[in-house]
Amino acid sequence: MERKSGLVVFFLGVVILWQGRGLSFGSLHAPGPGFFPTLIAAVLVLLSLFLIIPGGKGVREQNPLLASSFIRMLIVFAALVAYFLFLEYLGFVIISFLLMAFLFLWVARQKWYFAFSSAVICIGLAYILFDVLLKSNLPRGVLGF
């Protein structure tokens, strides 16, 4: 299963590289529109090789896809769709905090105090990076932040 996932990621990276070949790359100080897609696609291709090339001898997967893991995956997907739908209405800070807290609590199965404090730290750092330092226009939401 890991090899199949690695092949999918590999071909995704190759397709992104192929589609972005006409975009100008620019330089490190003045990146063009093809800089980040090319960089991300190259990283995808490189990291996919770790999944494609076998790492150990006789390593076999156990229970590759259980019904419970499929349900968990669907719930995480639903959370990401809800994030997308409510991002403009609730704003970046609130909806991102809710998503991060949910992922820490439900997916990572952390204690509530660790989940909430980690979510606050992650969203605080993201807010400082994107809003303060990079001066991006993050969605403010109904409460204005």
Image (tube, rainbow, N blue to C red):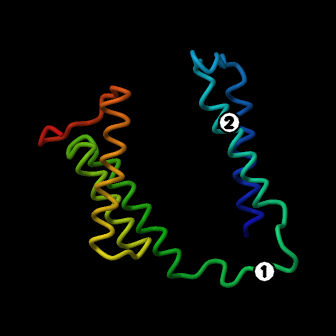
Q: Quadrant of the N terminus?
A: bottom right
- Mark 1 highlights which residue? 60
- Vertical arrangement, residue 1 with respect to residue 16, above or below: below
Q: Position of residue 9 (x, y in %)?
A: 69, 51
In front: mark 2 or mark 1?
1
For this view, does 10 lie left or right of residue 35? right
Q: How many marks?
A: 2
Q: Is the residue marked by circle 1 packed among few (<14), some (14-19), or many (20+) residues within 10 Å? A: few
Q: Residue 102 vs residue 107: left or right? A: left
Q: Can you name the residue that lies furthest to the left here? A: 143
Question: Looking at the image, which is closer to me, 85 or 126?
Answer: 126
- Give the residue drawn at x 66%, y 84%: 63
In the image, farthest residue toward the right:
57
Q: Which residue is mark 2?
A: 16
Quadrant including the C terminus: top left
Identity of the amino acid at label 2? Ile
- Picture residue at 38% right of the left edge, 67% below the top: 104
Looking at the rendering, which quadrant does residue 103 occupy?
bottom left
Cα–Cα span, label 2 and label 1:
31 Å
